[in-house]
Amino acid sequence: MRRLIYILIACLGILSLFAKATAASAWTLELRTPYNAKIQTIKTIQYTPLSSTQKPWRICALVPHLKDAYWIGIDYGLVSQARQLGIHLELFEAGSYYSKNQQLKQLKNCLNQPFDAILLGAVDPNLLESYSGHINKPIVALVNRLDSAIVTTRVGVNWYQMGWTAGHFIAQTVQESSPSIPVKLALLTGPKSVGGSDLVEQGLFDAIANSPIQVSSILHADNNRDLYRDQLHNLLNDYIPDYILGSAVAIEAAIGSLQHRNLTEQIKLVSSYLSPAILRGLYRHKVAFSSDDQVVLQGKLAIDIMVKQLEGAYSFGDIGPQVQALAQGDQQANTFKYSIAPADFYPIYRVSLKN
């Protein structure tokens, strides 16, 4: 009898470990409706990724660039999941958000080569309208909005929500300080009218509505630190804002610019997304806040969903990680495994088939 009890206890322990392992393998995600809408209804789900595939699929991924931590994090997620599943992945970067013709050429190449499907991080939401050839392979939108009747799955987050989250932090902080004069906010949100910059700005404006915050300038540039330094130089020569909100690359540039001018304590920096330098800035109290859309998880999810659709699953609609709000504090570094690529990771453009 005693032996039977020991066996039962051991079995329960094994089952408990198995349940924990299964739960740990699930990803907490959001399903958002309506598809591609600015304001969406969110349903939180537990998504179980694949552990194997029916065949060694070949996937082509197109991205705007690999010039910053955001798309490098996406690349790391794509590569990690492709290796995990033993499939073939090739990635092509257009070079910038202003390289629409280059991305159209790369799209043509992917359609003409023996790929099974395409993950498309579009430089323009209307990119497919400009493609004159026949599209005969499934396409999933990666990160960026892609307006086309043939694309019904997008892996990413709601960029309006990203902007709203950052703007809400500023509005709350200002409300708590009860300023007697308008608070000046400068925006450096990235390339104009491409990527998610427009939606970030819309979300921000809605979040600060009916507050004493005044958007004193809006500046756009490609995600290049030198370009942002030039903009910051001109901005700070004209006036001193209370807050600067921008892309991670812009805020990275702003950290140095403010230190050089001894303005670190005077101007609060807010990033619309996370990078390793922004995370260090949060730790060192040089950055006040950052949204985090878990780019590594987005990359992993994109591969997983693409394979599931190739193997017969229906469209997943608008799906992606939950946006996290990160203020200055002592977050544990291991909690960012889905947010930032490892420090020793360099862009990888090809994952070969498993032997």
Image (tube, rainbow, N blue to C red):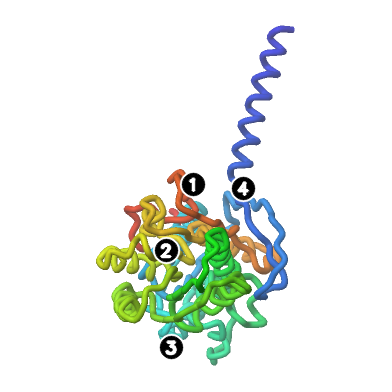
Residue carrying label 2? 268
Sooner in the amino-acid sequence: mark 1 or mark 3: 3
Closer to the chain start, of discs 4 and 2, is 4
Residue type of the residue flagged with mark 4: Ala
**Label 2, label 3: how far apart the Cα atoms are:** 38 Å
Identify the residue at horizontal 53%, vertical 89% (top origin): 131
Q: Earlier in the sequence, mark 2 or mark 3?
A: 3
Residue at coordinates 67% horizontally, 13% vertically from top-left? 6
For the residue labelled by badge 4, is the local secondary structure a helix, a strand or a loop? loop
| Secondary structure of residue under mark 3 | helix
Sort mark 3 into few (<14), some (14-19) or many (20+) by Cα contacts within 10 Å: some
**Which residue has dot 1 on it?**
335
**Closer to the camera, 212 or 35?**
212
* Inter-mark Cα distance, 4 to 2: 37 Å
Of mark 1 and mark 2, the one earlier in the sequence is 2
Residue 155 seen in the current view: no
Q: Nearer the viewer, mark 1 or mark 2?
A: 2
| Distance in Å between CA atoms under marks 1 and 3 | 39 Å
Q: CA distance from mark 4 to mark 3?
A: 39 Å
- Viewer-proximal residue among 175 and 10: 175
Q: Amino acid at mark 2?
A: Lys
Q: Can you say whether 192 is above or below 269 in the image?
A: below
* Residue in the picture at 60% in, 58% down: 322
* Residue at which label 3 appears: 101
Earlier along the polypeptide chain: callout 4 or callout 3?
Answer: 4
Q: Residue furthest top?
A: 2
Could you say where residue 230 lies in the image, as x and y percent from the top left?
Answer: 29, 79
In the displayed orientation, state which residue is furthest to the left.
260
Judge left or right: residue 239 versus residue 330: left
Helix, strand or loop at label 2? It is: strand
Residue corresponding to mark 4: 26
